[in-house]
Image: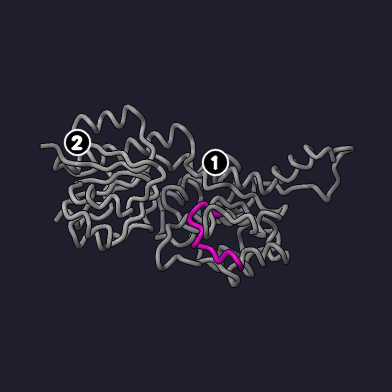
Amino acid sequence: MKKQLVVQGRLSDAQLAELSDLFEVEVLPKTTALNDPANHALLANVHGIIGSGLAITPQLLDTAPKLEVIATISVGYDNIPVDELTKRGIMLCNTPDVLTETTADTGFTLIMATARRVVELAEWVKADKWQASIGPALFGSDVHGKTLGMVGFGRIGQAVARRGALGFGMKVIYSNASPKPELESELGAQRRELNELLAEADFVCVTVPLTAETERLVGAQEFAQMKPSGIFINIARGKVVDESALIHALENGVIQAAGLDVFEKEPLSASSPLLKMSNVVALPHIGSATHETRDAMAQRAVDNIRLALQGERPISLVNEEACR
């Protein structure tokens, strides 16, 4: 008898066919919440859940006594109670590696766009305000040769740093990570305490995961330590930053500009002051949003759940303890 699998999220026809050859697959409509009471009977017999934006709670797990594995189509899993899964012997798989370069592209896009005021000036041209050569009031800032401060130096942070060091001749400094001698050798990167990095960097780029320790890691005190000409980039998670403190820093010239792909609450409210600031580039959480990368993420999740339900070790297993 085939094991049962629930899909909530975007999989290709080929990926669904691959899973359907091996398992009994139920695809939930996008508008149907996984924890909807109408799904309780389905969850009672499910062995695997695969999808993105999964809302997993202990109460939901109580309705799924046969559950063996959850495969999230994302790197982050701050919305999933990992300890609770481990306690119940349920594996959690994610999709690192496959989105590293794409997310780093997004980060460096924000660096370039904020420094050169790309969005602001593109809108200025579209508004038919380009009647003569621009003056200093509309000049941007150079990126090449500046100091790039990476808050977090994991896969994505390192990929952003490579773009800066090797492509733009930037000096790279990093914090919130153990020493990385191989990166120091490759890129000339130097490790700093966070307060030192904030004071020295021209661009502060945040790539740390969201944990209890990193929530609101950057707030009013940290923005005050940055240069007035400093530019702040966040491609991590919105809750890593105190958003009200960021707004205050931008409104009062504490820092020059910000490039943001993530926010405390998403989608960003239409009433957010960030949307009215010409010195802010705001994106709708597109870090990994390319056709190629999203397909690769989905395939990694498919591979993870297939292996797990066939009694093999998944490629990207978050909680090793669940296998013991």
What residue lies at 27% left-to-right and 46% top-to-bottom? 49
- Is residue 150 visible to the viewer in this orientation of the structure? no
Secondary element under disc 1, as helix, strand or loop, is: helix
Task: Name the N-terminal-most of marks 2 and 1.
Answer: 2
**Residue position for label 1:** 166
x, y percent for residue 167: 57, 39
Tell me the residue at 20%/47% (across/down).
Answer: 46
Q: Amino acid at mark 1?
A: Leu
10 Å crowding of disc 2: few (<14), some (14-19), many (20+): some
Q: Indicate how the structure is coloured in the image.
A: one colour
Height in image: 229 above or below 116?
Answer: below
Q: Which amino acid type is marked by label 2? A: Phe
Please provide percent x and percent y for residue 277. Answer: 71, 55
User: Label 1 crowding class (10 Å Cα cut-off): few <14, some 14-19, many 20+?
Assistant: few
The part of the chain drawn in magenta is: 234-244
Along the line of sight, the residue nearer the viewer: 196 or 73:
73
Q: Which residue is mark 2?
A: 23
Could you tell me which secondary element the residue under label 2 belongs to? loop
